[in-house]
Amino acid sequence: MMQCCEENRNQPLLKLWIGPLPCVLLYHPDTVEVILNSLKNIDKSYTYKFLHPWLGTGLLTSTGDKWRSRRKMITPTFHFTILADFLEVMNEQANILVRKLEKHVDKEPFDCFLDITLCALDIICETAMGKNIGAQKNNDSEYVQAIYKMSDLIHHRQKAPWLWPDLTYLLFQGGREHNRSLKILHSFTDKVITEKASEKKKHDERKCDFDSNCEPSGSKKRRAFLDMLLNAMDNGGNKLSYLDIREEVDTFMFEGHDTTAAAMNWAIYILGCHPEAQKKVHQELDEVFGDSDCPVTVHDLKKLRYLECVVKEALRLFPSVPFFARTLSQDCYIRGFKVPKGTNAIIVSYALHRDPGVFPDPEEFRPERFFPENSSGRHPYAYIPFSAGPRNCIGQRFAQMEEKAVLATLLRHFWVEANQNREELGMVGELILRPNNGIWIQLKRRTAHMS
Ligand code: HEM
């Protein structure tokens, strides 16, 4: 698909069939805008249906009034002050990662992909559910294995139209494994929600009893998204049901960890290939942190402007979600072409981000492209790693905070060298853009002021 867009860069759009589905591929800012800006064409495409058994119709997969009401209810849980509380979890997990990676300093190249991914998994588990599953220390857990199995199975099914009917799917081994993993995933979230709900009940009762002295003095309890979902209400004052909450928690688990994990891995890879840029990051880190080993604060994050440009440029070259799709609920016109209702519009951000008219020498890694003076006036739909418009990524600020905090912690300790060229990565655009061959790096220790 990526190659197809590249070869037809001068065409306004591409029409093709994927199995029985009529599709258009979009990879120009103005054509993408028509779809993403629309308040009507918000239905996800047919292949998202294979996420339903796991995620139900949570924020990612729902549509119409359900999506509108949920989006409104959940948006406040991503408020900046709440995100700031999550930074503590991000710092803790990033430090565990640093300790794990210590053993590789001045040693042979190693594949860091899983290490970074498990760090992202621990972060989302604790922030979404308030549960520390310690995946960084033990990745053999049934739940961790089931998450990866499930993502693989869903992707495989999306690519194979003969596996689309539920009945046929169940005849295959994949279908049976799918149901096994589903049980593990749901019983884990069920258990966590039940525990949290009963904790909340006890807490509310104590509060009614006497509205103070409930918590031991001085202890500040960490909030998780789940705590906020248990309190959330729609316009009519209705609370979310138990199943409503489960679909949202599962959605955060799915959408909120592989994406950030891939993004951090790609950023480490690309910095490992560009020592000049890495030196600038180190210099900035030294200016902000000096010799201290204090955890990263929100205030520090604001000062890491060059690192932010690195993160953005890495997501341009390697968008974690390389394409996403809508099914048109009404006819629309794109550059004068009538695209009928029912068509699947596939937005190929991987190709869009490589438009040489917007990003000259698109394959070059140049964080400077995102300096304010260089990005002002750029088409607002030319760079959309988090999608754009009303259905953009609700976790964007969370993800940016996590990426910067974890990368800053890693790079305060290590100098990174990458050991692969791009061809050796085995890049594949599945649900997530992944390096099939892993990310092989070497680490050297660094101390502040080395830069
Ligand atoms: C670098 C990290 C991330 C990237 C690149 C990313 C990218 C995206 C993209 C492209 C979409 C649109 C998908 C579509 O239209 O099918 C999306 C939607 C979404 N993302 Fe993210 N995401 C990231 C992190 C997160 C995190 C950390 C969370 C939650 C904690 C999250 C939660 C969601 C949700 C719930 C939606 C659906 C929003 C809606 O339809 O209203 N994402 N994300």
Image (cartoon, rainbow, N blue to C red):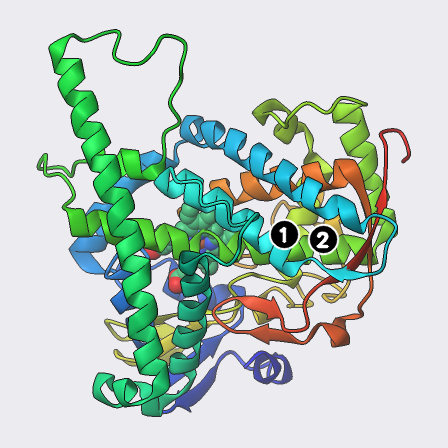
| Mark 2 touches mark 1? (CB < 8 Å) | yes
Residue occupying the point 56% across, 48% down: 136
Residue 409 at x, y = what percent?
69, 37
Left or right of 169? Residue 273 is right
Residue occupying the point 30% across, 39% down: 226
Secondary structure type for disc 1: helix
The answer, for residue 390, to whether it is visible in the render is no
Q: Which mark is residue 264?
A: 1
Judge whether 93 appears above or below 25 on screen: above
Residue 169 at x, y = what percent?
29, 86
What residue occupies the far right of the structure in this picture? 450
Q: Which residue is mark 2?
A: 268
Quarter of image, res 149: bottom left
**Quarter of the image that includes the C terminus:** top right
Residue occupying the point 59% across, 75% down: 428
Residue 272 at x, y = what percent?
80, 55
* Crowdedness near tag 1: few (<14), some (14–19) or many (≥20) residues, C-alpha within 10 Å: many
Name the foreground residue: 270 vs 163.
163
Name the foreground residue: 286 vs 349.
286
The answer, for residue 258, to whether it is visible in the render is yes
Quarter of image, res 254: bottom left
For badge 1, the amino acid type reads Met
